[in-house]
Amino acid sequence: MTIPTEEIVLNKIDSLPDELLINIFKYLPLDTILECENVCSRWQQLARDGALWREIGFVYSGKPGQSEVSERNLQIILTHGECIRCLKIQYVYSYSMIKSIIEQCPNIISIELVMCRICKDFENDIMNWPNLRKINLKNSLVLMNNVDVLVPYDHFKNLNYLGLSDFGLPAATRDSLLRCNNLSHIFIEKVKNLDLEYVKNLIVSKMQILIAFHIYGGEAIDDECLSMLSRCHSLQDLAIVHCENLTDAGLLKLADLKQIQRLQIWNNKMFTENNLHRTLSSPNLVKVVSLSLSRIANISPKIVDVITENYKNLKFLALYQCSVNTDSERQLKVKFRHIDVVLV
């Protein structure tokens, strides 16, 4: 009797240890993983393994025109809520809907609410997931004006990623960030009116672990802050949206960022051409994959030459509103024709 080829292949796969099978499943799309549950009881168990679902970023979107996909994903949440570890909810404007979805997922370690509307209740509801490692509220809004959402971030002992909208860091909870011992990715570029001394304390508290730091800036950033950030030896991603108060002394410190991969410095008229040239010529900076110098004065042809000649790894470049002349614009477009270049 001839054994079907499919059965031989299945028997060989079944001889693999659980850990290897789970690693194979990680390369499969979610639809296929769900189908694997129907193969046998063993595969059903492996297809629901936490190690596998930690790699799956599950998205529920309320965006108009995606009702069929939304209904399907909602059904997955209802049947696999205990499996979901990383949940992203977007374009949902009913907080009761958001809450009902999250409550189906008792084991999440990452929650993202993007383009959503949340209410005061969120500060209590989120406390039910103390093992969160990532909280991202960027581009979401609070339903009621003049209402502070008070989240004590140090409640989440494993938190390493925090992304906030402008409502996310009222004065009453700011010190809780100082006590988040694992917080290495901080995205607070929409939070205005931070105190300069607070920002310095925040940098000091994360100096040994800081990997990404995005901040609004303004009066909350000065040259000393740049000096402190230059001593954050793991820093790979830095963005300062408003750096009007920085001088050449702070600019030159950027050259000491040894691990930097993404650099965004916006809005400054005080940096001189010579020190822009000196800083951007640094062997540390020429390795970046993303560079944004929008609304920085004195981006001259000399500066453009430095960028075109030395920045071999760039995948994104922004010189928005930098008064780049026609020849320099042509030079940039020729040199970086395969990547995104924002000039106007």
Image: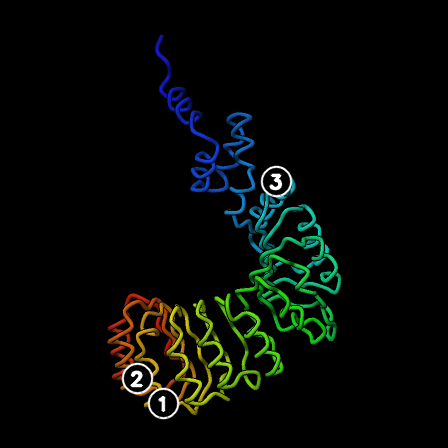
Q: CA distance from mark 1 to mark 2?
A: 8 Å
Q: Is residue 28 visible?
A: yes
Q: CA distance from mark 2 to mark 3?
A: 54 Å
> Residue 212's x, y, as percent?
49, 68
- Please say if the residues under marks 1 and 2 sit with CB atoms less than 8 Å apart: yes
Residue 195 shown left or right of residue 208 in the figure: right
Name which residue lies at 62% across and 49% down.
108
Tell me the residue that label 3 is attached to: 80
Q: Which mark is residue 104?
A: none
Dot 3: within a 10 Å radius of its alpha carbon, few (fewer than 14), some, or many (20 or more) residues? some
Instruction: Give the amino acid at mark 3.
Output: His
Q: Nearer the viewer, residue 211 or 5?
A: 211
Dot 1: within a 10 Å radius of its alpha carbon, few (fewer than 14), some, or many (20 or more) residues? many
Residue 101 shown left or right of residue 274 in the figure: right
> Residue 1's x, y, as percent?
36, 7
Tell me the residue that label 1 is attached to: 298
Front disc: 2 or 3: 2
- Please say if the residues under marks 3 and 1 sit with CB atoms less than 8 Å apart: no
> Residue 307's x, y, as percent?
29, 77
Lower sequence index among marks 3 and 1:
3
> Residue 119's x, y, as percent?
72, 64
Instruction: From this view, report whether residue 109 is shown above or below residue 120.
Output: above
Instruction: Give the amino acid at mark 1.
Output: Asn
Q: Which mark is residue 303?
A: 2
Q: Is residue 344 visible?
A: no
Of helix, strand and loop, which one carries label 1?
loop
Q: CA distance from mark 3 to mark 1?
A: 55 Å
Of helix, strand and loop, which one carries label 2?
helix
Residue 133 shown left or right of residue 99 in the figure: left
Residue 334 shown left or right of residue 61 in the figure: left
Quarter of the image that includes the C terminus: bottom left
Name which residue lies at 53% across and 47% down.
54
